Amino acid sequence: MRGELGNPRLLRVMNERRLLDRLHDHGPASRADLAKVTGLSKPTVSAALAGLAEDGLVHLVGEVSGRPGPVTSLYDMNAGSAHVAGIDIGRDWNRVAVADLRGTFAGRKDGRNDARNTADLARHVRELAHAAAAEAGLEWSAITCAVAGTPGVYDPVAGRLEFAYNLPGADLVEHLRSALESDLLIENDINLAAVGEHAYGEGRGKQHFALVSIGTGVGMGIVVNGELYVGARGAAGEVSYLPATEDPAAAGGPDALEHGSTEAVASAPGVVRAARAAGLDLGSAKEVFEAAGRGDPTALAVVEAEGQRIGGLVVAVAAVLDPEVIVLSGGVGRNLDLLGGAIERRVAALGPLRPQVVASALGDSGVLLGAVARARKRAWELIFEARL
């Protein structure tokens, strides 16, 4: 009996969702156009639009005249009817953006991560979050939901972050939930970077691609059949643990294996160690690439070796996943102008696989954009759960 009573409401909400999805993806439309493309009757479309308009989820945005018949009203989703937050927590920087339901940023705040413990880190994120909301003209309490990207793999059972060696503690999630007091999802940062690339970058329109991030650490986000793939325990893409051809202990010190063989030699700290071993007194991977860009022969040799390492990683990814494209991101990975030749030579030397490799165009905003995209999806779920 209860199920029968619930069916009309469920059907109404499903119809509303179809209309909102259409407006979200294609923009303003008339009732007649919506009926035509969705297959719903005109009375059903009118009733659904009336309910959505009453709750502020759609609004009238214009009229079309000058053709036979009455003036035609145009409707669109009200992107400002709810706002979400994306959070990027990194070793050096924390970033928070507040966006509407179409993903347009209404406020953003970035700040250096100088926290020495997880409580300080959560407080810093809270300050940025409230400042970003204020910039958007909102109270933080008005945010429908938030998604935070962090290094490592979140274990929802234990409530802890695993493999997050660049953060001050594994209990960050508990502190974040307490500090933000909001509907909060925690995701791996590189997975969110892949989501961002799929929504806004080089992965747009692709059903199968991989994002390989090489910066402070090394990681990969995987999209299969248009959906993020994380594996049985959320650890898919932890390519930092792939075996390296070089001795990671010699390259990265006694703790190298804890962070992974590939990360020890291919990450930004690995590039710096290789440069210093070659006689360059440089303090960052950025300085190494700048020196290579100026034509310094020693820096060019270091970059060549790094490109060879990345080329081997690219072939391993292509052999397992066969993606349409492999997107390189991170402070090291996006230097494809300098790394590209070495990557191509290594790929050619390893066999017949020839994956397409491109650099991310999202810069430092990839994780943040992915967090916003994921938060928008979560917001729709919450909105329609409430309507049921």
Image (cartoon, helix red, strand yellow):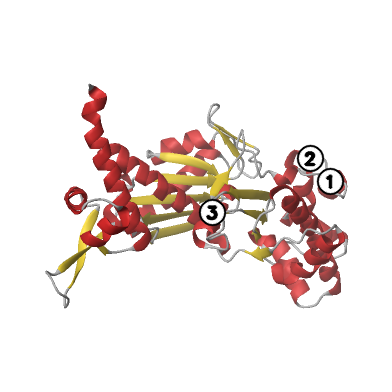
Element marked by disc 2: helix
Between disc 3 and disc 1, whose residue precedes?
1
Mark 2–mark 3 distance (CA, rounded to whole Å): 26 Å
Instruction: Give the residue displayed 71% in from the left and 72% down from the top.
Output: 337
Element marked by disc 3: helix
Q: Where is residue 5 in the image (x, y as percent from the top left)?
A: 21, 28
Element marked by disc 1: helix
Between disc 1 and disc 2, whose residue precedes?
1
Q: Residue 367 carries which label?
A: 3
Q: In which quarter of the image is residue 335?
A: bottom right
Instruction: Give the residue displayed 55% in from the left and 33% down from the top.
Output: 171
Nearest the eye: 174 or 312: 312
Amino acid at dot 2 = Leu
Instruction: Give the residue displayed 44% in from the left and 58% down from the top.
Output: 109
Instruction: Check whether the beta carbons of the residues at disc 3 and disc 1 lie within 8 A of each other.
Output: no
Q: Which mark is residue 248?
A: 1
Nearest the eye: 35 or 143: 35
Mark 1–mark 2 distance (CA, rounded to whole Å): 7 Å
For disc 2, the marked residue is: 257
Instruction: Check whether the beta carbons of the residues at disc 1 and disc 2 lie within 8 A of each other.
Output: yes
Nearer to us of marks 2 and 3 is 3
Q: Position of residue 348 (x, y in %)?
A: 83, 63
Q: Around disc 3, counting alpha carbons within 10 Å, would you say few (fewer than 14), some (14 to 19), or many (20 or more)?
A: many
Between disc 2 and disc 3, whose residue precedes?
2
Vertical arrangement, residue 198 with respect to residue 299, above or below: above
Can residue 134 be seen in this snapshot?
A: no
Mark 3–mark 1 distance (CA, rounded to whole Å): 28 Å
